[in-house]
Amino acid sequence: MSGFKVRTPRKLVADINVVPYIDVMLVLLVVFMITAPMMTQGIQVDLPKTNSTPITSKDNEPVIVSVKKDGSYFINVGGDTQKSSSLDTVKGHALRILKHQPDTLFLVEGDEAVAYGKVIALMSALQGAGIEKIGLVTAPPEE
């Protein structure tokens, strides 16, 4: 019986090949790394709660920038209110204030009837001037 070969049973491989999974994960990582910076645009805004506590500023008095119904801008610094004609003049005032007092908090006060885009444009201009501390002024809820 020399014509018959005796087969030796093959040993089963029980390992999982993870190389394709690693390739897929690296491709996904690259895709997320490329698309993530594109998705972070806009102004970071912490919306106020309805029952918020008043801000107590010990060091500097906050600068209040107001937007009225007609779209006019006002800057209130220490009780002295100045009217600004455009966002560029608001930005110029903000830069001067920030130069003398870098820790100044800027509060945006928008009229109830003003368009949301006007408030966002104002906040964007302030952020473009290098101001990091921007808050929103709200009235307490009516009960």
Image (tube, rainbow, N blue to C red):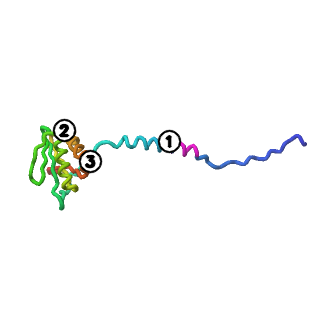
- Please state which amino acid type lies under the numbered disc 2: Ala
Part of the protein shown in magenta: 19-25
Residues at discs 3 and 1 in contact (Cβ within 8 Å): no
Secondary structure beneath label 3: loop
Secondary structure beneath label 2: loop
The residue furthest right is 1
Front-most of 23 and 126? 126
Using residue 76 as the reference point, say whether residue 18 is left or right of it.
Answer: right
Where is residue 42? Give x, y as percent. 29, 42
The residue that appears at 20% across and 52% down in the rendered structure is 99
Where is residue 4? Give x, y as percent. 86, 41
Q: For the residues marked 3 and 2, what is the alpha-carbon distance in whole angstroms?
A: 16 Å
Secondary structure beneath label 1: helix
- Mark 3 and mark 1 lie on one chain; the one further toward the N terminus is 1
- Mark 3 and mark 2 lie on one chain; the one further toward the N terminus is 3
Residue assigned mark 2: 115
Using residue 125 as the reference point, say whether residue 32 is left or right of it.
Answer: right
- Mark 2 and mark 1 lie on one chain; the one further toward the N terminus is 1
- Please state which amino acid type lies under the numbered disc 1: Val
Residue assigned mark 3: 45
Q: For the residues marked 2 and 1, what is the alpha-carbon distance in whole angstroms?
A: 43 Å
